[in-house]
Image: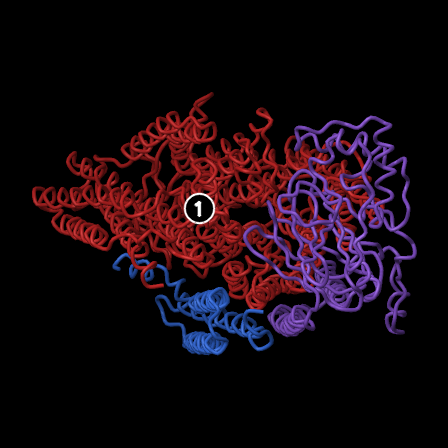
Amino acid sequence: MSDRRHPTAADAARLHADLAAIWANRPGLGALSAVNHGTIGLRFIATGFAFMLVGGLLAMFIRLQLAWPGNTVLDPQRYAELVTMHGTTMMFLFAVPIMEGFALYLIPKMLGARDMPFPRLSAYGYWCYLFGGLLLYASFLFDAVPRGGWFMYVPLSGREFTPDISADFWLLGVTFAEISAVAAAVELVVAIMITRAPGMAIQRMPLFAWYILATSLMIVFGFPPLIVGSILLEIERATGMVFFDPARGGDPLLWQHLFWLFGHPEVYIVFLPAAGVLSTLIPTFARRPMVGYSWVVLAVLGMAFLSFGLWVHHMFTVGIPLLSLGFFSAASMAVAIPTGIQVFAWIATLWSGRPELRVPMLYVLGFFFVFVLGGLTGVMVAFVPFDWQVHDSHFVVAHLHYVLIGGLMFPLFAAFYYWLPLWSGRMSQRSTAGAAFWLIFIGFNLTFLPMHLTGMLGLPRRVYTYSSDLGVDVLNMLSTVGGFLFAFGVGAFMLDLLLGWRHGVRAAQANPWQASTLEWSLPVPPPNYNFAGVPAVASRDPLWDEPRLPKLIAFGERYLGIARDGAREMLGTSPLDGRPEQVIRLSNSSWWPLAAALATAASFIGVLGSFYLLALLALAVAIGCFVGWAWSTGDRRAPDRLEAGGGLRLPTQYAAHNAPGWWGLAVFLCADATAFAALLFGYVYLWLSAEAWPPAGWPPPAAGPALLFAALLVASSAAIGLARASLRRARLFRRWFGAGLGLGLLALALAGWILLDGLPPPTAHAYASVSASVLGFAWLHVALAWLVALFVAERHRRGWVDAGRPLELRVAQVLWNYAVVVAVLAIALLVLFPRVL
Amino acid sequence: MRPLIRFVQHFPLLAAVAAMIVWAIHFLLVYAGVGLACARGYSTTAVLLWLATTTVLALLVALAITLAGFDRARRPETPPHGQRRRFLARLSALLGGLALIAIVLTALPMLLVPPCR
Amino acid sequence: MAPFAFPMPLGSADRDLRPRSAARLVLLALLPSGCHGPQSMLSPHGPQAEAIAEAWWIMFGAACLVLVLVVALALYATLQRAGRPPPARPLRIIVVGGLLFPALALAALLVYGSMLSNRLVGASDPGLRIELIGHRWWWEVRYPDGGPPRALGNELRIPSGRPVLLEMRSDDVIHSFWVPTLAGKLDLVPGRTNRLTLMADRPGLHLGQCAEFCGELHAHMRIAVIAMAPDRFEQWRARFAPTPVPPPAFAHAGCDGCHRHDGQPVDGGRGPDLAGFASRRGAPGDTDALARWLERRHPAQLRSRVADVSAPSPAQADALAEWLERLQ
């Protein structure tokens, strides 16, 4: 630093202009090719908000129908459709995506990064989400609206009781949207681990990043069970294979387990980012750092773990041994402890600070009442005998709305007010904002507080009408009136926000709340590249402790204050201590994500309409898009090392150890391994409820071919390993790599033979279906690894991969070994399990 | 194996949350044990033995992790990574405490409810 | 509007809300009357429901206390006046409020819940076994023991004062049997048999409803549980009076495609057995209303499910209603 001339204002202006040109989205329709995290984050937020309005509209119809007994606004079928779509929209199309939108928008800005590490993946995730949501709503056009309730219990959603394609709309639409959630989660984990500002060691991360890290990991481990469950149900509906039908060895409770394995963590996946918002706002308005940073991190990680031990508390009434219920009751109560720590950490922070009652703080106070009430009824339903009474009644409806609206919407509204000046430079008027808040607060409580009693008086959930003799007429009318007040409140909030955005008071300075996190060091509105110069950070509250920071950033000092090669560059740092390690060169705007998402959508539509040829064709196109996408990464001409500012020369990611691609693969494989585990759980679960395994008359798969299969795969893995070791000698590399590919191909063929020869026809019995699925899962993974390896072989031949830039080979090798492990485990299970147990 | 080890090395957070992983494994083992025993009609003694063994083991391991965390958290912060080490040690100890409470809570029903009722 | 299953007005004689103990009397006097109802878990008439209602009131009191405390603290912390000294050791707030208090309170609650659930499930050895089968959207009740085989539709008769064992299964999708005044709910899951011990303190009529969404007419899947004095129950069980011969409209309108009326358990039933139809209404109802319901609503509701149903003419409906009212 010292030997360098400090940039002048003119230098800074030139740097900004150059960076702005490099990072600009394309004009006009070209904006659809945007991949920048700011643009994508705002798209997520806007789309999520729009879906919330639609979901809220459905809720108004529901409340209208229930206003008095015997109302006929909706007929029973339409009511079931709207209830299903309301729940599905709010959970899958609003709550998760909008918080991911906030995370995508804010995390790089808070961490001192210029973008997310996989910008095209962000864009692909967004398109998957949008198309998934549109696909779901397209069901209205075909009068095949999903109507099985948002948790789609079988057998009601099976082919026998839902013969039309309404359930398929749900399964495919939701799975599509979930791909997006997993993609964003993988990316957020990688961003938080390796793209923090230099010096931002793990103990100095802004708290919001801890929440998002925990949430993203929860998505990584929580969503795959539902994806597996949805795919199994879709297969059962489409092909007649069987997983859930008890007549042929299936079990309807397997669906419930898979659904709630996702479903309970989901509640915390929704709550944690919102809690992260609160942990950002409260220290700002209390004018002091959070009391007990380690305790808050403890609470976040504790909730993330414990929330995976709650899923059966949605199944207390299905007839499971009492002791098992006890375990889940215990975990449900245990999770209240980190929640309590969290709440009291906020209180302690407010108490020991000097709180200012600004507009966002209104929602924070509203949150305390609503969320604590929801948490307390949550403890009640964790009490097993009480749950036997109120489960699936309106009491639970009240409880879940207290938790979700309290835990998500109040913090979300606070977040809109809080970050409005960052994005628009203007602030909302306090008087109108207050009116909107009170409408929302009173309307919400009027809707859902009486509903507790409605449920205890005997009204089950999802009934389209009720009889007067229950004595719930007045309560229901109250709820309806409250619901409409609530809706007016949301309308007033939107109006206020809009006015604030367009005509609000100009914020006196760039950091109007005097906050401590890095996003407030940016100009308004933040440029696409965020930081002209990537700052170095030495504390948890950088803007409080180093007031000069915004100026340093604006002048492009410290790191990467360079615009070169027309390339978007960001800094990669070490996961623990935030030591600069690499320069990550990112993709510019690209059409590949949109093309890939469109092709994916086409293949989903093909499955939906049973146009299987179309589905296969579209899948081929999608794979082509992914290959094109992958091929256009990398830069053959880029030097191995780049000037990174601060006197540092750093490798690009292709030569770096902690490359984003490697991390992305590792996190993705965690999700994939969870999916595999969910499938194995299904196998064991069906075995447990079966009388004979395999069913009488079928021998278990033969051991000989299975052993050969495993041996081929292990040998192929060894060959790929030898190829990697001989990367410096091209001919030897090619020979070993080719051997690995050949062995892999043999194994793939052999697996097909085992499937046909060793198992009963897959539609005969759940044993055959689930065994074929396990083998099919393994086969797909080996096939995928094989394709990726082929891709890398070609890249090597053309000189993109060499000993100095081994990243792609490393990725291919990890994937290969993983696929081999999966396949060997799968075949061992199929062969050994029926023999040993 | 190497990627796995490297993953753990690059993710000392895994070490910090070790006690919660112990809780998760214990939870899974006792739940699966009861489910299996009740579906297959194993003897009550065997189930109780299984529950007792896994619980005692889990408690011991979680306790060891917690104490080790406390011990490391009390050591002086030595540069270059002292601050970070102490933070992760404290986190490990706190999560250890939470895991201990959670395991004790899981064990309570075992004392009060007979298996397979 | 009349629901799918014709509404069941409650005979006033069947409802006895008088509390038995002085403590309960005091408790009930303090409650707003809005908590009571024919399907309210807060008007318990059996030992299970009573124990759960008691647990509810305990939890309710504790929850109110905690809520007021936390919200008051949050308000106090936020709306403080300038110059008030901050807490000396703020971390202590977290440890006491967030860790110690919840851990102890929740451990106590967990012990209470485990003991209670164990007591409720392990209730005294049930004498009578009854089969309950869930159909879309009606309940089939069968009495295999203690007399000639017998079947009822949407009606469950039990002796009061002693526990009965319900063996529950489903014929199609998942249903859930919930009679809040007697006990918590239990699901009817295809492919398994779940067992619920049910007991009513005194003779009386209790209403229940399916609690697991089972499709379009889920809201109408209700059941009347009639608790009878044990001697009257034995009488009813032994007596087997043939039902009056139905009017010709029963066949003409296609009623016999789904409904039987002889109280015989037969597999593959498509609709509830009508034997005893009038008795589950508690008191004589409005025959004319019943006729109009048979004429209009019922066929409309069936049309989505049953192809061969035709609406009865007004005269036929009158005859059918008059006949139904005699099915004691």
Q: State which quarter of the image contains the C terminus of chain B.
A: bottom right
Q: Write the residue at 49% across / 38% down.
A: A177
Count all numbered tags in the image, as a single digit. 1
In the rendered picture, chain A carries what hue?
red
Q: State which quarter of the image contains the N terminus of chain B.
A: bottom left
Residue A20 visible, this angle: yes
Closer to the camera in the image, A765 or C278: C278
In the image, residue A370 above or below residue B79: above
Circle 1 Cα neighbour tier, 10 Å, few/some/many (<14 / 14–19 / ≥20)? many
Q: Report the residue marked by disc 1.
A: A228
In the rendered picture, chain C carries what hue?
purple
User: Residue A364's x, y, as percent?
Assistant: 67, 52
In the rendered picture, chain B carries what hue?
blue
- Image quadrant of residue A791? top left
Q: Amino acid at mark 1?
A: Val
Residue A387 visible, this angle: no
- In the picture, measured across the screen, residue A571 lies left or right of residue C67, that is left
Q: Write the residue at 45% across / 76% down.
A: B46
Colour scheme of the picture: by chain
